[in-house]
Amino acid sequence: MWPSKLLLLVIKKAPAGAFLLPAQLRAIFCGEFLKESMRIPKRYEQIIRLILCGLVLLASPVFAADKVLDASSMASKPLSLTAHFAVLEDPSRALSLADVQQPNVAARFTTDQAPATALGLGFTQSAYWLRLTLRNTADQVAERMLEIDTPRISSIEVHLPMAQGSYQSVHTGADVPFATRPYPNRNFVFPVTLPAHSEQVIYMRMESTVGLLIPAQLWTPQAFHAYERNDYLGQAWYFGMATAMVLFNLLLFLALRDSIYLLYVSFVGCTVVTLAIKNGLAPEFLWPGTALGSNVSYYIGTSISLGAFLLFMRRMLRTAEVVPRLDVLVQWLVGAYLLTLLGYALSLPTFARYGIVLNLATTLLIFCVGLICAFKRQRSAYFFFSRLCHADAGRCSDDAEGDGGGADQRVYGGWRSTGIGA
């Protein structure tokens, strides 16, 4: 019965829910072996050796390692990295790279991520560490592009392994200047070099003041550059049209002196700037040396844009005459959006969730006002409500695309259609 007793003692000393590294296993066995060595019958020696060899193999990286991604041969399409991540939550936000490499902390990484386009972690004040193992089985060096397909993550640290066993660390994110990015792109892109016949472990630490959604992909350089060209072409087309609409309506205001055109210009102008922040273009082209592309700026821009839209709606639909009771509620909402500016500036994580609820309530109110005015045969309400339906279709399109912005950004996504068509 001695071998089973020794095995039971080793299992009891193993950390709960963790795998044992070979060094840990040897240490436990040595301690128990010294205690029991004087009582080992000769006939059990061979059995004990077999048990030791088997447990060492089970504790080796072959059984306990992360999911390894072979990056040596890739097609033109990107590979989603969600299922290949090992994830560790850091509620204290105090762990360093050296800490997460320690065996007792490394054993706490979870590797059961389901395949998906993005790793959704929700609203959280914790930092998250991601561990990714890449392998190159080819005879030549493999160059790859690791893309985080959203510009809204507040803080990103990427630790790339070097030849001597050390790590090169990059600290960037939405809340720091654009110049900190190793590759100039509206999203976060990190060039990765994999030597021939090698295996590398990349560590990433991510933290956000709002919802944390991580759509990570791996590209070949050629495929990524083609995608990047088309992506910027589409962004330029949209923002070019939006700018033309602003200038056209500004000229109409100067010619006709009708305040409704100035309200519309204010709404579309705020919407364009806010969408530029959301898409990561503002920190790249408008203010690259500052942190004005942060989530605080994005939420403040959203509040200003929706407040401006409410004022434009009041003027266009004449709500004070057609629906006076709802008009009072609209004015209260405008005041609430002014208060959110202070709340976001002081503590965005605290007020962000309430802001999303406020945005949803505003969207519902706008649809109700437009529908009621249309039923009351207010002529401009017909055009207004048709544009709202078009905007809702645009928002649904954003959801289907999975733009990586989370609920806070999807609420605002459809207003770009309103900005062009109102």
Image: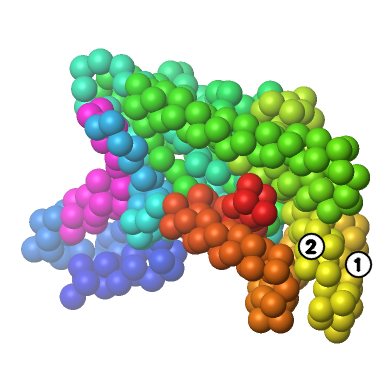
Residue ID at (27%, 60%): 37
81 or 292, which is in the foreground? 292
Horizontal and vertical percent position of residue 358: 75, 70
Q: Is residue 76 left or right of residue 96?
A: left
Residue 250 placed where, x, y %?
Answer: 81, 38
Give, as a three-letter code, the residue at label 1. Gly
Decide which of 123, 392 is in the foreground and name it: 392
Residue, disc 2? 316
Q: Answer with left or right where residue 268 lies relative to residue 63.
A: right
Residue drawn 40% across the image and 52% down it: 117
Task: Look at the picture and state if 107 lies above or below 252.
Answer: below
In the rendered structure, which amino acid carries the disc numbered 2? Met
Q: CA distance from mark 2 to mark 1?
A: 19 Å
Q: Are marks 2 and 1 in contact (CB under 8 Å)?
A: no
Task: State the residue position of label 1.
Answer: 335
Residue 56 shown in magenta: yes
* Residue at left offset 25%, top offset 23%: 197
Q: Secondary structure at mark 2?
A: helix
Q: Is residue 66 visible?
A: no
